[in-house]
Amino acid sequence: MNTPLKITKVGNSAGVILPKELLAHLNATVGETLSVVLTPRGIELSAADADFDAQMEAAREVMARRKRALRELAK
């Protein structure tokens, strides 16, 4: 798919309107969160992982409990 997208002003930011075909390809709907990753070729846009926030919270808890061990491993 090679569809030109127009950048529009949204308050103090800028936005791009995604066509419904692109949203369908991403398995995303209006109101959902998308993930953007910088790559050597540009950007990669994908549907956000629903479990990511829960996984990060669990990781933060483990890191807080094992702070000394992680500090030693980082040396």
Image (tube, rainbow, N blue to C red):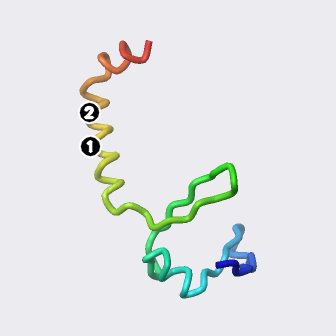
Q: Are marks 2 and 1 in contact (CB under 8 Å)?
A: yes
Label 1 crowding class (10 Å Cα cut-off): few <14, some 14-19, many 20+? Answer: few
Identify the residue position indicated by label 2 in the image: 62
Above or below: residue 51 compared with residue 5: above
Q: Residue farthest to the front?
A: 1
Q: Which residue is mark 1?
A: 58
Q: Quadrant of the N terminus?
A: bottom right
Q: Amino acid at mark 1?
A: Ala
Between 61 and 37, the residue placed more toward the observer is 37
**In the visual, does 64 lie left or right of 29?**
left
Q: Which residue does the image show at 34% across and 54% down from the upper left?
A: 53
Residue at x 49% of width, y 78% of height: 25
Q: Position of residue 55 (x, y in %)?
A: 30, 48
**Picture layout, residue 12 above or below residue 3:** above
Report helix, strand or loop for mark 2.
helix
The 10 Å Cα crowd at callout 2, few under 14, some 14 to 19, many 20 or more, is few
The correct choice, above or below, for 45 with respect to 52 in the image is: below
Q: If the image is split into quadrants, where does the C terminus sit?
A: top left
Is 53 positioned to the left or the right of 47 in the image? left
Splitting the image into 4 quarters, where does residue 18 fall?
A: bottom right
Q: Position of residue 52 (x, y in %)?
A: 35, 54
Q: Is residue 31 above or below residue 52?
A: below
- What residue occupies the far bottom of the structure in this picture? 20
Which residue appears at 74% of the width and 75% of the height? Answer: 7
Indicate the quadrant where residue 71 lies: top left
For the residue marked with disc 2, what is the amino acid?
Val
Q: Quadrant of residue 44?
A: bottom right
Report x, y in % for residue 64. Answer: 29, 29
**Residue 4: x %, y % from top left:** 74, 80
Q: Say which of 2 and 5 sits in front.
A: 2
Q: Secondary structure at mark 1?
A: helix
